[in-house]
Amino acid sequence: MTREHNLTALLLLAALAAILAGCFRMSADELYSLPRASEEYVRLQLQIDAVLNSGAEYSPPTGGANRQSVQVKDLDGDGVDEALAFFSVAGSENPLRIHIFRKTGDDYQGVDVIEGGGTSVESVRYADMNGDGVTEIIVGWQMSTALQHLTIYSLRDLQHVRIAGADYTGISVCDLNADGGDDVIAVRLATAETPGEAESFTLMSDGEVVSSVTGLSTGMESVARIVSGRLRGGSPAVFVDGKAGGFTITDVLTYSDGLVNISADAETGYAAATERALSMYCSDIDKDGSIEVPVTTPLPAQSETTYYEIDWYSYDASGNRTLAQSTYHNNSDGWYIILPGAWRSRFTVRREDSAPGERALVFSYIYERDGEELLFDDCLKIYSLSGDNKEERSRLSDRFVILSEGNAIYAGQILPGGRKYGPYDTPEDAAGNFRRIYSEWLAGSA
């Protein structure tokens, strides 16, 4: 018998002895029964069952971070959570219902119902828009396949009042104007009748809603992601990554006496400076607290495959951009490497996949161009290794391990050019500039 089995047996004997001695006053059925739900949960479930028994069915939000059928949130700022339950009622003019239940002691009572039209609740967000401690509810209603409409509700004594609404393609909630309260930013693509726009909603202390509108890039066809963050210098901003004419572009939205798009060209209305061939998202690539926008440049080719250097630019509040970092991303193998400044537009790469379970990329420094011919030295090789013997292969010849993670090992090899041109002339240099790729940086295949 193993040590673990001995310990289990001793614990069982101790428990049995305690029961026989009367230390635990419970029956065998009680000992093996599942934990009971709390009394307050049971009472909330009774309220929900009453709604379900009236002909409703659960209809939770289909998108966003809050997708539960029943959500708990302190809406009125009194320190006690309310419960919100999402339903639909077939055949009704406004079939979508959000029931709000107030907790009093261990009991729950229905106090309000928000009704809406459409096919589903696309998303729900909670925000204190004016800093008074009372939460506003931002509901996205899916009106049809092609139309979404958001409504902002203010709550007073847990009774909803509609204070603003707009059609949208995507939503961001953040303190964009830095006044201490959250703002709602609705992004909507162009239609045959209207241009693409972004609209911000700010709730003032007196209850007035102030909106501001700016244009999206001309030709933006779809929105891939919307993220809030900081500009260089600390100003809040919203970054809208989208597609236009086969490229990925970014509209950088900030607040300066109103909502402004600082990356779109003033004359063309298009964010040409952010255009990139790869479907990559904005990110704080150098971890300095501000979001950078990636821009791709094709590398001189050693083969028919096109590879790209990626330059990451940060923006200030006036729309001026500064190079923050340059990288090469190997999306196929899930890693990237930080490039030295001296290598910008002076290197090339090629693949060398010579064996099953072994993928390799060679970095070469271009020391001269002779017309169309590139004169280069191989500097660094990075391997992505998998399979049963990956550990042995990671140490073949003069290879060194960069990172061992899950089912893969990433290994490097310093080549003659690396010792001549640097900066990856030691294993420590190569490993120190190696990073894993996280999925949020990518949209689709790249």
Image (tube, helix red, strand yellow):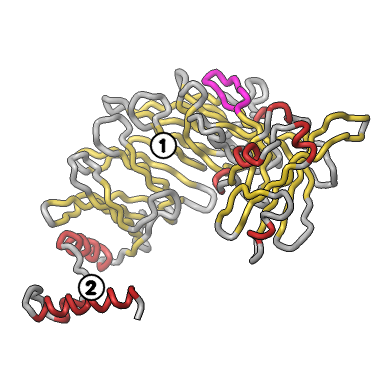
Left or right placement of residue 38 versus residue 366 in this view: left
Q: Can see residue 307?
A: no
Residue 389 vs 201, above or below: the answer is below
Location of residue 236 in the rendering, given as x and y in whole percent from the top left corner: 45, 27
Give how far across and how far down residue 151 sits, in percent: 38, 41
Disc number for residue 173: 1
Left or right for 165, reference 283: left
Instruction: Give the Cα distance between marks 2 and 1.
Output: 41 Å
The residue stretch that appears in magenta: 314-324
Of residues 185 and 293, the one drawn nearer to the viewer in this rendering: 293
**Image point (46%, 40%), residue name:** 171
Secondary structure, mark 1, is strand
Q: Which residue is mark 2?
A: 34
Q: Is residue 165 magenta?
A: no
Q: Residue at x 36, y 32 (%)?
A: 182
Look at discs 2 and 1 and give the one toward the viewer: 2
Residue type, numbered disc 1: Val
Where in the figure is residue 145, as x and y percent of width and height? 53, 53
Q: Residue at x 66, y 52 (%)?
A: 333
Q: Residue at x 60, y 32 (%)?
A: 293
Q: Quadrant of the N terminus?
A: bottom left
